[in-house]
Amino acid sequence: MSLALSVALVPGITEAKDAGKDVSQPKIEVLPKAKENMNDRSMKPAKVESDSNATILDEKGKEVGKRSFKSNTRSKDTMMQAAAATRVVTVLAVADEEYRAQYSDWQTRIQNAVESADNAFYRDHNIDFQVKALGNWSSQGSNASAILSDLSNDWSGYSYDFVVGFTRDANFDAGGIAYVYSSAPSGSAFSVNLDQGTTNTWHAAQHEFSHNFGLGHDPQGSGIRCIMNYDYSYSVDYWDQDHDNQIEQNEYWYGN
């Protein structure tokens, strides 16, 4: 039996009338926690494809600082790939109070998680996720679904393509959770990931970003090696052909 959990959208996403945008109520998909918490708290620097500047936001969304991130992939091959990149998408990454209390370097950690999740999107689809803002978030909710709704309520109305939360909230009963859109969302796309160690967390983030592009799951027990199959979600960083095709079809929902 699949562990997939699909539920109706909880309150917090307002309808919009933008032509060509998704104003329907998207599904929620839940990724179970990893069977093994790798507890790898040390970080290997993720590949950062482009120099970027990020705004630091407090819990009310007010700017309180700036951070700069430098590219560390200046080889000839990566520079040629960067020149050929078809999409640059913007990300607001936020950490809740429990996450920030655990890690004094929380800004670096969540930026690193997004950049690690971005590697396969960049490698296979020329999509470059760039963290443009880092936010302080106060997560509220009795379970993962409610916490995702809280993220949407707190951070709707910003101009970023993706808003991704990172949490250590004891009520977050999943490895990750995201809205699954059937067409381009009218605003930002939302997801939340549980801190499960460095490697498990970025795998979950890649899985949830994939849901934001409209991807569903592969059947468990099917043997399909894909990050959208629960059997491999924490061990591979690639998609099967059908999901690759779907990303290619939907990549224009975000960025430029």
Image: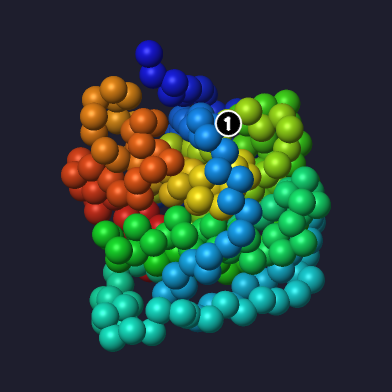
Colouring chosen for the image of the structure: rainbow
Q: Is residue 89 visible?
A: no
Q: Is residue 75 visible?
A: yes
Q: Position of residue 115 (x, y in %)?
A: 48, 63
* Res 134 → quadrant: bottom right
Q: Position of residue 113 (x, y in %)?
A: 54, 57
Number of labelled discs? 1
Question: Where's the C terminus, which quadrant?
Answer: bottom left
Q: Position of residue 166 (x, y in %)?
A: 64, 48
Above-or-below relation of 179 to 73:
above
Q: Give the secondary structure at mark 1.
A: loop
Q: Residue at x 35, y 46 (%)?
A: 236
The residue at which mark 1 appears reads as 174
Locate residue 110 relative to residue 105 in the image: left or right: left
Q: In this view of the protein, which residue sits in the foreground, 244 or 123? A: 123
Locate residue 141 relative to residue 224 in the image: left or right: right
Q: Position of residue 189 (x, y in %)?
A: 50, 48
Q: Residue at x 58, y 31 (%)?
A: 174
CA neighbours of label 1 inside 10 A, class few (<14), some (14 to 19), many (20+): some
Amino acid type of disc 1? Answer: Ala
The residue sitting at the top extreme is 1
Q: Residue at x 34, y 64 (%)?
A: 122
Above-or-below relation of 102 to 47:
above
Q: In this view of the protein, which residue sits in the foreground, 198 or 83? A: 198
* Res 105 → quadrant: bottom right
Q: Residue at x 28, y 22 (%)?
A: 221
Locate residue 254 relative to residue 139 in the image: left or right: left
